[in-house]
Image: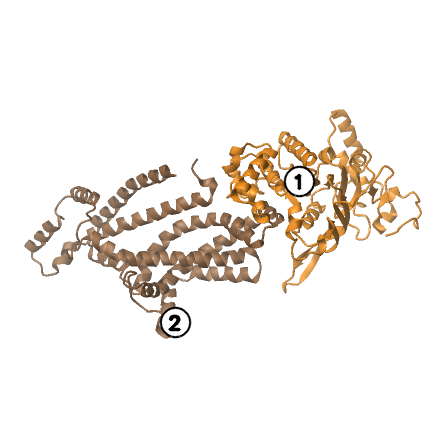
Amino acid sequence: MSAPLLQIDDLSVTYWDRSLLGLRANGFEAVKRATLTVDAGQTLGLVGESGSGKSSIANALLGLVPPSGGTINFDGQDLATLRKGFPPEIRQKIQAVFQDPYSSLNPSMTVEEIVTEPLKVHTRMTRVERHEKAVELLKLVKLPETHLHRYPNEFSGGQRQRIAIATALALQPSLIVLDEPVSALDVSTQNQIINLLYERRDALGISYLLIAHDLALVHHISDRIAVMYLGHIVEEGPADRVYHQPAHPYTQALLEAVPLLDPARQRARRAERRGRVTTDMPRLSEKGCPFSGRCPHVMDRCTARMPPAFTVPDGGTARCFLLDDEPNEQGRSKD
Amino acid sequence: MLRLIGQRLLAMVPLLLIVSVMTFSFTALLPSDPVDLIIGDRGSEEQYEMVRERLGLNQPFLTRYADWLLRAMTGDLGTSFFNSVQVKDAVLQRMPATLSLTFGSVLISITVGLAAGVAAGLRPGSWVDRTATFGATIGQAIPNFWFGIILASVFAVSLRWFPATGYVPLTDSPMEWLRSITLPALALGLSTSAAIARQVRSAMVGVLQQDYIRAARAQGLSSRRVVLKHALKNALVPVVTVLSFQITVLLGGALIVEQVFAINGIGSLAITAVRQQDIPMIQGIVLILVLVVMLVQLATDILYGLINPKARPT
């Protein structure tokens, strides 16, 4: 198998407060040694609740925040060490679609200006060529050409998100970071946008890093899924396996948050869950598993140290001692 | 767009009418009598009646107003009570000085306000931001005439870089014109610079948090392009709003600053006219100033539509 398009290893992102003297103080580690892989033409779904560090990974990948550790290998180059911004060739290959289409489009630019701006910056296309490209891009996202001279405030959320997608497609990137691309849209529009993304990926061979908090939606479009909890990637694996046989208790809890269609079953499950998972904010153990405070299967060693990544039988890994087949303490801790 | 401008121009007519009725009424309500001022203490009863008749003050109020209005519509604003100068000529002759001063200070306020506001808004909480915010507070607190006196004593009297008083028309010598209005325009523009700087700063802070800025950065645009093209244009929207009413403030302030720098503009004309109860002159000055203010506001409204597509008429 060829090398993956994107290989993130041990990535950490730390945010610093500035003290009075302008020195760094009170670091908060939003991403803790995360490891992720995206293959060419594939979609990796990254799920987790808000504050789990998903968007920080996206920001590091887009060069918006500098990583505090680890490597981001993209197309044979380590982006984590590029402190002075990414070179244009990398920029062109990684594009992004953000969550809120009401704030992600500049209100003072026409659709044509928005869609062609990446071309203006990164290519030497003439005005006429850019216009032709803009027409083509609008066709790709199924918007009529007549919209080119309108302003964002004249469009609905779904239409705006299509414009954002057209902009992301303009430079024919190999990877698009989708940061909660549909969570600001209503449900019927969500499906249209998801289907559009799906079609474009298969037609153009793009990879997606899809960030979302809705596991069902992520499962629908992803090849692999990674689950984040408080900065850690706690589980990773093929989408079907993670969705149908979650190995980590946190993933299981997330899946139980997806409502069931049958009210009776939903009621039964809720009653059962109430006895297990606490929803209180857990006390954080510094050394141990971040989920140990909420976990129904918590063991002594969970609070002592962070579990290493154990291989899950049907593919992928999970960082939980439940998967340790040698339950003795000296087991196989390589980390 | 043209229809909008047409509508706005038409809407000025009733407004001008109301303003003229109000000024006319106020001058009529004054307890003292301009005729007394003209003939002085020793004037006889006949002289008094003669002057009253000549000025038309023996006519009833409404007749006088109608008469004035009819002539004003043909562009004739009457003659001064005190010297036979045409009001229109007097006002138009003084106008360039006042307008130079006002627009000079608008230019200074925009330059200073934008620069300080952008610098502060880019890094909220930094020392640049704190200095600019502190400066803006001071700037808004200092009265313009006092600042004018300070400027004059430092740069004109001590350093002799600029003339302390007087105004040189642009047509006489552009260089001297610039020198003559620099200090007064600075004095006048201080508080507006501060107001604009505050507005730009908070608008920049708000705009920079928008996702389209994050999107622009992620696309790999240079920070210069992100700030100038994406952030500033949107941050300008509230600035234009501030500017449209600050221009009225500046025009009013110009009348005072003119006194400090002994510039023969509308200010001294107005003060003399009011002191003498030169009714046609007061009337003419108010009318023309109101007209200027309304035109400036129309211009800022058009500008507003240009930079903010949401405010554009559809």
Farthest-out residue, left: B46
| Quadrant assignment, res B2 | top left
Q: Nearer the viewer, mark 2 or mark 1?
A: 1
Please give the name of the residue rendered at 10% of the width and 49% of the height, measured from the top-left corner.
B53
Which residue is identified by label 1?
A180
Instruction: Please give left or right for residue B215 compared with residue A227 in the image.
Output: left
Which residue is identified by label 2?
B154
| Chain letter matching colour orange | A
Please give the name of the residue rendered at 28% of the width and 60% of the height, measured from the top-left corner.
B171
Instruction: Please give left or right for residue A304 compared with residue A81 in the image.
Output: right
User: Which one is nearer the viewer's eye here, A11 or B120?
Assistant: A11
Kind of residue at badge 1: Glu
Image location (x, y in percent) of residue A288? 82, 50
Q: Judge whether A269 appears above or below B168 on screen.
A: above
Which structural element holds mark 1? loop
Image location (x, y in percent) of residue A92? 64, 47
Chain bearing mark 2: B
Kind of residue at badge 2: Val
Q: Badge 1: how crowded within 10 Å, few (<14), some, or many (20+)?
A: many
Q: Badge 2: how crowded within 10 Å, few (<14), some, or many (20+)?
A: some
- Chain B color in figure: brown
- What separation in Å lies between label 2 and label 1 (alpha carbons)? 60 Å
Image location (x, y in percent) of residue B114? 47, 56
